């Protein structure tokens, strides 16, 4: 966790991804899925999760999600691309999103 700007780490993780796939992955593999900043790197994501949730991270996989093409009448546009991080915690560790923040 040393060597990283703490202010940047706090802005890196944007939100947890809540979907059928993410809950399935959390139950089966103990991985948690987060929406992260486009320029985030794996070591930064690891440090940010360890800082924010006080857990130990084993590994991080990232995926770039392409924005969907959408139409509004005759106008066509597309949503933004975004980055998704799969964070695998060390055995015995867990993240409880429902816990109250003190």
Image (cartoon, rainbow, N blue to C red):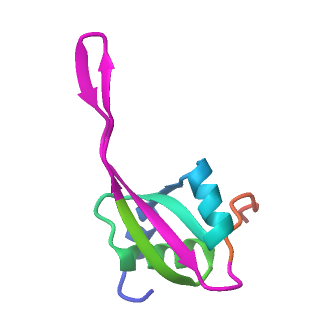
The image position of residue 81, as x and y in percent, is 30, 47
Which secondary structure class fits the magenta region best?
strand
Q: Is residue 76 left or right of residue 62?
A: left
Q: Quadrant of the N terminus?
A: bottom left
The image position of residue 14, as x and y in percent, is 47, 55
Q: Residue at x 47, y 73 (%)?
A: 48
Residue 93 in which image quadrant: bottom right
Q: Is residue 5 visible?
A: no
Q: Residue at x 33, y 67 (%)?
A: 40
Q: Is residue 75 magenta?
A: yes
Residue 67 in which image quadrant: top left
Q: Quadrant of the C terminus?
A: bottom right
Closer to the camera in the image, 22 or 39: 22
Q: Is residue 47 left or right of residue 28?
A: left
Q: Is residue 44 above or below residue 73?
A: below
The image position of residue 37, as x and y in percent, is 36, 58
Q: Residue at x 48, y 67 (%)?
A: 86
In the displayed image of the protein, which residue is found farthest to the bottom?
Answer: 2
Closer to the camera in the image, 44 or 74: 74
Q: Is residue 18 above or below residue 24?
A: above
Region in magenta: 64-93
Q: Is residue 20 magenta?
A: no
Number of marks = 0
The image position of residue 71, as x and y in percent, is 30, 20
Q: Residue at x 75, y 62 (%)?
A: 99
In the displayed image of the protein, which residue is found farthest to the top?
Answer: 73
Q: Is residue 65 visible?
A: yes
Closer to the camera in the image, 89 or 38: 89
Q: Is residue 22 above or below residue 72?
A: below
């Amino acid at each position: 966790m040393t060597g990283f700007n703490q202010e940047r780490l706090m802005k890196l993780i944007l939100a947890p991804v809540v979907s059928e796939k993410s809950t399935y992955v959390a139950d089966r593999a103990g991985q948690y899925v987060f929406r992260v900043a486009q320029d985030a790197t794996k070591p930064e994501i690891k440090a940010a999760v360890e800082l924010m949730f006080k857990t130990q991270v084993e590994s991080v996989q990232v995926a770039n999600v392409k924005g969907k093409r959408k139409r509004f009448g005759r106008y066509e546009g597309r949503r933004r691309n975004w980055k998704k991080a799969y964070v695998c915690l060390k055995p015995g560790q867990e993240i409880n999103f429902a816990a109250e923040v003190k």
